[in-house]
Amino acid sequence: MKKHNGMRPQDIVVLLKIIALKNDDWYNSDLAQSLKISPSEISEVLNRCKIARLIDSKKRKVNINSFLEFLIYGLKYVFPAEPGAIVKGIPTAHSASPVKEHVSGGSDIYVWSSAKGTHRGQAIEPLFKSIPQIVSDDKLFYELLTIIDTIRVGRVREINIAKEELEKRLKYA
């Protein structure tokens, strides 16, 4: 068995993309192209996730219960995020759907820095550098990423809302 050297942020991104695809009829090259990650890195991600038991032995289907548990209880400790400078970007965390519908308008605005962004807010480092470029193509994928960013930077109430929204989307994946 291969040695597991720990999770990397792109592992989370790849698993979320697999969930957003809603089927197991995909190729590593499809994931690589859509996420702007090399095919060899996709292969490494899938191997790490198999060892961590976050994906099945065939590396096609995400183990939803294990992944959900990791996202809720481990993500903010393994991949913490600190709000940064005010920049132009794409809304994330509780500044984007689906969490923003449940919080009052007085909350801080968080964004992934992007020249194509339409909002100004505090910068949140995305889990992977290509995220601001690729989220516009896939609504569910974008929602999943904003939900987990809420878990990474939110306050207790926002995190509880994010957990509910995440469970809604993953339990039926």
Image (spheres, grey):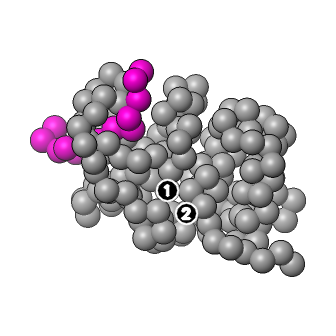
- Inspect the magenta stretch and tell me whether residue 113 lies in it: yes
Instruction: Determine if residue 101 is in view.
Output: no
Labels in figure, total: 2
| Left or right for 126, reference 58 | left
Q: Residue at x 76, y 72 (%)?
A: 51
Measuring from the top left, give residue 172's x and y in whole percent: 61, 50
Labelled pair 2, 1 in contact (Cβ < 8 Å) = yes
The disc, 2 or 1, on the residue closer to the chain's N-terminal end is 2
Q: Which residue lies under the disc numbered 2?
A: 68
| Main SS, magenta residues | loop
Q: Nearer the viewer, mark 2 or mark 1?
A: 2
Q: Residue at x 33, y 22 (%)?
A: 118
Look at the image and give the residue range highlighted in magenta: 99-116
Q: Residue furthest front?
A: 85
What amino acid does circle 1 point to? Glu
Q: Residue at x 54, y 68 (%)?
A: 70
Residue 106 marker: none
Q: Which residue lies under the disc numbered 1?
A: 167
| Left or right for 164, reference 65 | left
Q: Is residue 47 above or below residue 168?
A: below
- Inspect the magenta stretch and tell me whether residue 62 lies in it: no
Q: Is residue 93 above or below residue 72?
A: above
Measuring from the top left, give residue 87's x and y in whole percent: 28, 33
What amino acid does circle 2 point to? Leu
Measuring from the top left, give residue 52's x and y in whole percent: 70, 72
